[in-house]
Image (tube, rainbow, N blue to C red):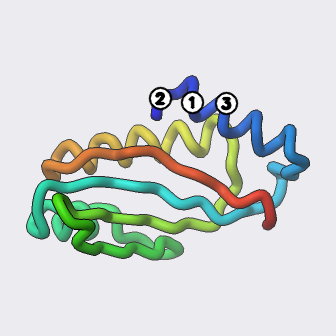
């Protein structure tokens, strides 16, 4: 997902009535080749307020990060930069995010 898709997702939230002044649950997806990479990524991403799930998804390992946060171009842009860099350094890939309409 690129910055353009981030903007489109934020626009879709607003068009469906989301109040971006209120925090909402966001879910961020990563893919890793193996458990070692997935675990390394999870350690890099660990912070208060982040729920991290690492699991075997068949051909690869998935890392799913759930955060309750304010969604906007700046906050998502900062996370994208952090997440892409962390994923790259762990041998994984950031695959994008989604957010709930409800707070």
Q: The C terminus lies in which quarter of the figure? A: bottom right
The tag on residue 68 is: none
Residue 73 falls in which quadrant of the image? top right
**CA separation, marks 1 and 3?**
5 Å
In the image, taking residue 9 as reference, residue 48 lies left or right, namely left
In the image, taking residue 19 as reference, residue 23 lies left or right, namely left
**CA separation, marks 2 and 1?**
5 Å
Above or below, 31 relative to 55? above
Give the SS element for disc 2: loop
Q: Which residue is mark 3?
A: 8
Q: Would you say the residues marked 2 and 1 are in contact, meaning their CB atoms lie under 8 Å apart?
A: yes
Give the SS element for disc 3: helix
Category of crowding for the residue at label 1, using alpha-carbon neighbours closer than 10 angstroms: few (below 14), some (14–19), many (at least 20)? few
In the image, taking residue 46 as reference, residue 103 lies left or right, namely right
Query: Farthest residue toward the right?
Result: 17
Q: Which residue is mark 1?
A: 5
Above or below, 37 relative to 80? below
Point 76% across, 38% down: residue = 12
Query: Farthest residue toward the front?
Result: 58
First in sequence: mark 3 vs mark 2: 2
Q: Position of residue 18 (x, y in %)?
A: 85, 51
Q: Which residue is mark 2?
A: 2
Point 13% across, 60% down: residue = 37
Q: Would you say the residues marked 1 and 3 are in contact, meaning their CB atoms lie under 8 Å apart?
A: yes
Q: Pick whichever, 34 or 82, lies toward us.
A: 34
Q: Position of residue 48 (x, y in %)?
A: 47, 75
């Amino acid at each position: 997902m690129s910055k353009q898709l981030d903007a489109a997702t934020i626009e879709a939230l607003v068009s469906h009535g989301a109040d971006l002044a209120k925090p909402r649950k966001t879910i961020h997806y990563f893919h890793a080749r193996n458990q070692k990479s997935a675990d390394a990524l999870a350690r890099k991403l660990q912070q208060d307020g982040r729920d991290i799930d690492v699991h075997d998804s068949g051909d690869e390992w998935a890392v799913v990060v759930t955060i309750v946060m304010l969604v906007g171009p700046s906050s998502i842009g900062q996370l994208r930069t952090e997440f892409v860099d962390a994923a790259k350094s762990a041998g994984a890939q950031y695959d994008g995010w989604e957010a709930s309409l409800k707070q």
